[in-house]
Image: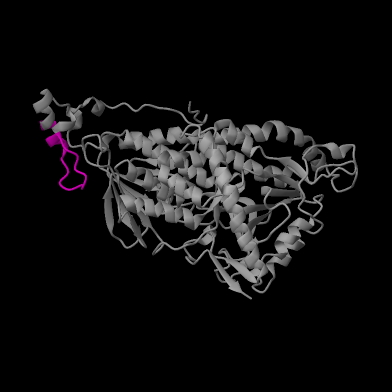
Amino acid sequence: MKLLGSGLVALATASSVGAFVLQPKAVQVNKNNVDQPKIGELRMAADESFGFATAATKDLDLLGLPARPGRPIKVAIAGGGVGGLTAALCMLKKGFDVTVYEKTSAFARFGGPIQFASNALSVLKEIDDKLFDRVMEKFTFTGTRTCGIKDGLRADGSFRMTDDSIDYLWNPDAPADWFVKFPLKECADLFGLPYTGVIDRPDLQEILIDECKALKEDFIMNGNPVTAYENKGKGKGVTVTLADGSTVEADVLIGADGIWSAVRNQMYNEGGIKSTSKDGKVRQGCKYSGYTVFAGETVLKTDDYYETGYKVYIGPQRYFVTSDVGDGRVQWYAFFALPPGTKKAPSGWGGSTRDTQSDPEENLVEYIKSLHEGWTDEIMTVLDATPPESVEQRDLYDRPPEFFRSWADGNVALMGDAVHAMMPNLGQGGCQAIEDAYVLTEVLAKTKATSMIPDSLQEYYRSRILRASAVQFLSRLASDLIINAFDTPWSPHDNLGKSWKSYLTFFWKPILQYVIFPVQFAFLYSYYPSGRMDDIAEKLRDRWLVTHKESAEAAFDRAAEGFVYESGPSFFQKSEQPETVLAARRD
């Protein structure tokens, strides 16, 4: 039995058009979208079969599927990122006529790893078995291994594996490295799902593009993004304006063009793309989160490499995250509470220029190490292995949930970061975009006439708003708690944690371990349209254990021979630096 997330609300859309019934042989589906039959012709066919037609169907188009009379629904998608491409594939598989309008001039391999939690993997499986299999071939599981929060000051520097018990309270020799471990595997097993992990964004985009092209070769138009739209009224579609001034007609426009969305800018009248307030704290209606993040990537074999997925080191006023991203690589993030515009690093993975920095010659690794003075040597080891020129930085903006404004305007709807951009702490940004794509497609597939599209888009909004908003809230809460309410936990054996936050952090431990984290991850994974996949999950894990070690050891051997891995531009500035993600050179 499938258990859907509590955030999903099933709402039926009623319309008088739904009373108009046709036998399949009365009209043939025109798959080439040429000389599409208008409703008048369909009425005549129905008159011959049934002797009646409803007045509500005049001057409208019936929308068909492969097994239903009518023409394909025509969909324009703004943005060819993960959300837009997933939506395109979902819709193409349903028989829709889909075109994606992407601002980059051509597909190039850019972007860092993206996390897919178990809920997103279930959606991919439900969308297409082949898509799921191809993603799994490139996947690195993290949820099969230990993931959790480590003490940024007390971890002994050896990357050792220890328990997260409270033995250290009465035993001064007991290790206090691990504060709390996340129940990722247990919650995935609860629903019989594959385990959380990461895939390189270029690999994912390449897979999605290949699968879309197999259904429609010319589905994507590069170098000509959507800049504006005009709703033409119920049943009459939307006119989409592109960057070169040309226009296209569609039944539906989907804004999947990211946090600085042109479609959103017009829908909510936000004053211009990336328009920024004088204090820099509001950009296109999006508030600065209060945090900036530095990021880097290196190849590094640690003693816990095969035993840990990702680790969050906590301490005073900041936190540091490391994650295995496959092929021997470790990606790290350092979060700081700094004002917006504190520009220290470029925004591309080693590919962009550094002349916009306050000091282009500054060694960014040493700068980040200076902000972690007194922290565990495990962080210093990771930073020391990172080429300083590869470090990048991004100010983090997120949006509050849109409870009082619909995600849809007539024949136009938003999805993904365009409407619910969120903090990266739970790794759910891409996952929620994939859920959007699936739900939106399912709702539109039930839409039988163009006049019903606006109501269907409102149904999509109502179906997604509660769950997506809950995930937004949890993602933001994680940052706020770690930065503002967490500190080095109190211990009776040293003086590292003596503030009120230290005592609070200590008392939070059992609540986090036995209540909050199990409930949180169970909620995230509770949306799984594929149903249980117990056997598949186990087989994938067993196969991956072998291939992961082989690829990692090969990378470690190359690094020992003198190869230095350089990251290509990340998703922070993907459109500005469409270069190769990973290159290797010999010093």
Give above or below for 563 relative to 3. Answer: below
Residue 459: x and y in percent read: 39, 33
| Foreground pick, 556 / 152 | 556
Residue 346 seen by the camera:
yes
- Report the magenta residues as a range: 27-44
| Foreground pick, 185 / 399 | 185
Q: Quadrant of residue 503?
A: top right
* Farthest bottom residue in view: 587
Q: Residue at x 80, y 50 (%)?
A: 155
Which secondary structure type mostly characterizes the magenta part of the structure? Answer: loop
Q: Quadrant of residue 92?
A: top left
Instruction: Judge left or right: residue 345 versus residue 123.
Output: right
Instruction: Judge left or right: residue 502 versus residue 343.
Output: right
Instruction: Judge left or right: residue 35 versus residue 478.
Output: left
Residue 398: x and y in percent read: 56, 48
Residue 99 seen by the camera:
no
Give above or below for 412 relative to 365. Answer: above
Residue 288: x and y in percent read: 59, 51
Total marks in image = 0
Residue 257: x and y in percent read: 43, 52
Q: Residue at x 79, y 58 (%)?
A: 377
| Foreground pick, 164 / 575 | 164
Give above or below for 325 relative to 353. Answer: above
Give above or below for 558 relative to 450. Answer: below
Which color scheme is applied? one colour
Residue 317 drawn in magenta: no
Instruction: Judge left or right: residue 176 versus residue 358.
Output: right
* Farthest left residue in view: 48
Question: The C terminus lies in which quarter of the figure?
Answer: bottom right
Residue 33 drawn in magenta: yes
| Foreground pick, 93 / 134 | 134
